Amino acid sequence: MKLIGRLYRHAPLATRNEITPKLGFALTVLLALAWLIPFLWMGVATLRPASDGINLMAELVPSLKPTLDNIRDAWEIGDFPRYFLNTTIICTGILLVQFVTITLAGFAFARLDFAGKTPIFYLFLMQLMLVPVLLIVPNLRLVAQLGLYDTLAGVMMPFFASAFGTFLMRQAFEAIPTELEDAALIDGASLFQRIRHIYVPLSIPSFSAFAIISVTSHWNDFLWPLMVINSPDKRPLTVGLSVFTRTAEGTQAWGTIAAGTLMVIAPLLITFLIFQKRFISSFVTSGIK
Amino acid sequence: MSLAEPAALPVAASTPPRLHIVTRFTARFRASLPAYLLLLPSLVFLALFTYGAMGRVLIDALYQRATPKAPLRFVGLDNIAAVLADPAFTGAVVNNLIYAVGTAVPSIGLALLFALALARTNAVTSTLRAALFLPVLIPMVAASALFLFIFLPNVGLLDYYMGRLLPVLPNWLGDPDIALYAIMIITIWKNAGYYMLFFLAGLQSVPEDVMEAAHLDGAGPFMRLRYIILPELKPTFLFVTVIATLNAVTQVDHVFVLTQGGPSNATNLVLFYIYQQAVEHYDIGMASAATLLTLAALMALTALSFRTMANREGGP
């Protein structure tokens, strides 16, 4: 309680001396700990030897004889390196194309005046409201018609244009002083040269914010790749994990499921722990849209 | 030669007005061409996968096949009528409504609590924030894999620890009366930390001096929350509610991993129903009709919320 009292003295005005101020803060601390329990179980279960039996599986106190057997089993049962590669290809492919499309479109909206600017802008805005996940049925049919069923390109294509990314880049480009561009114009720089040498380098923070949002969301995508991909060797991590979980569930191999889950979420979690601030500010931006 | 310019004007005016408009139009188009070229890559993909998809849903909903291989037959609004008459669909809609309210209200409430408690930045609060934010980053499928064990009857985490407190334990995912609430716990766990970020951002616009002044005037903490903080957070509330509603309709990965819509359709949500119709029953007509109805409902909701938001901003 003394610790909570000390932490609480630094609490913001908004909460200080609230009706049940200490209670509110203490509740948040408790819930934050509760929030970590699934992660804690995952870690403990991954290292628990199978000899501990199913009855101790739920024990959150780590085993005294930790083992890496579960990780090895998960690695052998599921084709995780392949899943990793597929997810990496999907995320990188989407991001690279998005960088091109959002830079060009963002620049047009930020710096050029053209006929029909407002209606076209609203057309982009509409994509934010339409919720792409709901359009899986027509998009699956289109991907099949294009001969891209069961290909990674088919998984990527619907995300190549991003209204959110376009708005983000438009905002970033608008903040760049026009004097810089004027100077380049006098030097005879072409449109693409100006974008490439002035606008892009000065907007790196916005690009990285967008990259975080884009990679996180497509790393975690499940339903769409589940529908497009048929061959086991083209599965991304999420689809691979769901198949793996179903297989291991039948044999009650909970330690292996925990290990598999750990492998799937570790890369993003580690990246997050390193770049925490950047992640959080990107996610806040993603809400501004 | 400066006199030559005004002299040129009558010549321009003598061209027929119609042609004048056309030349002006082409000139405007020519000036706009670079912008169009820059927008083209984005517009191609948007046209294919967003606007085109919308149109195809509309058309697909009007057609039906007797068997997967049979030719398309125009059936008008029959698909929509069939979907509306399908107890599985209406059940999914009801489930989805319960799910939407039951996940949005607790996760937004918790998010507000977290944000209020963790608004000031120091080492402790940022650690707690990170702990609450972690579930946002992991795939729903991975969260489901973890909760599969948490909800496991008898030996699972929940029963293992709660078994000491409660005499009778429910079968979390196996009981039709409980399964929907069980998967709602996962959603709340996963989203509260996300919504917290928006409240944290919103709290920054609460002026500290107003809070200070209210404090000096003897306004209690409840008064300050009620009359200063919450009104300031209104746009955030609205925004987060829209996001939470969209999430309730678009996040179904846990249904795939944990329950497959069961037991006896108790956890069937609208998007899972659409998936079932399209992929399991090969019934594109029904799937499209269900998609159309869902899209219409969501767009009406979003439009309504935008209007409310616009009215609020324009209001006093």
Image (spheres, coloured by chain):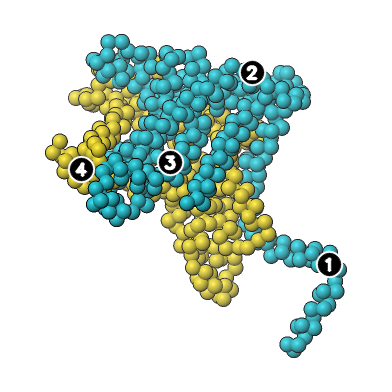
Residues flagged by tags 3 and 4 on a common chain: no
Q: As drawn, which residue projects farthest toward the top?
A: B168
Front: mark 3 or 4: 3
Disc 2 to disc 3, how far (Cα)? 35 Å
Image spot of residue A56 (x, y percent): 25, 17
Count residues near mark 3 (Cα–Cα under 10 Å), then give few for <14, some for 14-19, many for 20+: many
Is B65 in front, or is A167? A167
Query: Do the residues indicated by labels 1 and 2 lie within the same chain of the protein?
Result: yes
Please report the residue visible at 67 percent of the width from the left and 20 percent of the height from the top: B82
Could you tell me which chain the residue with mark 1 belongs to?
Answer: B
Q: What residue is pinned by disc 3?
A: B237
Which residue has dot 2 on it?
B85
Chain assignment, label 2: B
Cβ atoms at labels 4 and 1 below 8 Å apart: no
Secondary structure under tag 3 reads: helix
Same chain for labels 1 and 3? Say yes or no: yes
B190 left or right, relative to A31: right
Q: Amino acid at mark 2?
A: Ala
Element at label 2: helix
Mark closer to the observer (2, 3) = 3
Q: Secondary structure at mark 4?
A: helix
At a point 55% along the width and 33% down the height, the residue shown is A224
Q: Residues within 10 Å of mark 2 (few under 14, many from 20)?
A: few
Q: Which mark is residue B17?
A: 1
Q: In this structure image, what is the colour of chain A?
A: yellow
On residue A8, the disc is 4
Look at label 1 and name its amino acid: Pro
Horizontal arrangement in the rendering, residue B102 relative to residue B291 (left or right): left
